[in-house]
Image (tube, rainbow, N blue to C red):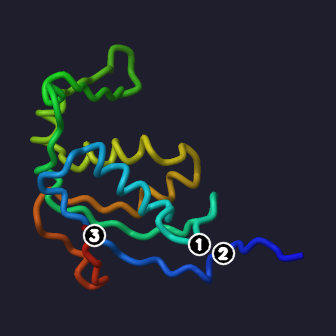
Amino acid sequence: MQKTYIPKSGDIAHEWKLVDANGQNLGRLATQLATILMGKDKPTFTPGVDTGDYVVVVNAERITVTGKKLDDKIYYRHSGYPGGLKQINLRDQLAKYPDRVIRQAVWGMLPHNRYGRKLIKKLKIYAGPDHPHNAQHPKPVE
């Protein structure tokens, strides 16, 4: 009887991938990033084992959305104090913190546990075209 192959942490080679968000749709980009982070695009994918790659996203400020989401989509956060609920729409969030828009969209597609928190740390997002990860030689993703 043959056993199922379970990759060990030493057997896995994590690559670096570069994604240009210029003109890409937010939701479609987020699903692509979540797939790469979890390693679901690899034949060695195993649930609960970190087989995914590091992802560097550039031009985060240039993503697109359809419909009236720029004004109608609201992001909420809470300070923890009574009356501390803050809200901001997508247009203002993109202007101030474009990395948070993509990070929150990808986080919604990852597991909400220790494993997901480990995966989201492998996502590096930058508003402009420059990034400090040239030493890792990230490979461009179509």
Q: Nearer the viewer, residue 94 or 39?
A: 39
- Element at label 3: loop
Name the quadrant of the N terminus: bottom right
Where residue 2 appears, x then y in whole percent?
Answer: 84, 76
Q: Name the outermost residue toward the right.
A: 1
**Horizontal side of residue 38 vs 28, given as left or right:** right
The residue located at (12%, 33%) in the rendering is 91
The residue located at (26%, 70%) in the rendering is 18
Q: Nearer the viewer, residue 112 or 31?
A: 31
The residue located at (62%, 82%) in the rendering is 10
**Horizontal side of residue 18 vs 15, given as left or right:** left
- Element at label 1: loop
Q: Is residue 29 above or below residue 38?
A: above
Q: Residues within 10 Å of mark 3 (few under 14, many from 20)?
A: few
**Horizontal side of residue 11 vs 4, given as left or right:** left
Task: From the image, tell me which residue sits under label 3.
Answer: 141
Badge nearest the viewer, 2 or 1: 1
Which label sits on residue 44? 1
Q: Residues within 10 Å of mark 2 (few under 14, many from 20)?
A: some
Q: Earlier in the sequence, mark 2 or mark 3?
A: 2
Task: From the image, tell me which residue sits under label 2.
Answer: 7
Figure quadrant of residue 35:
bottom left
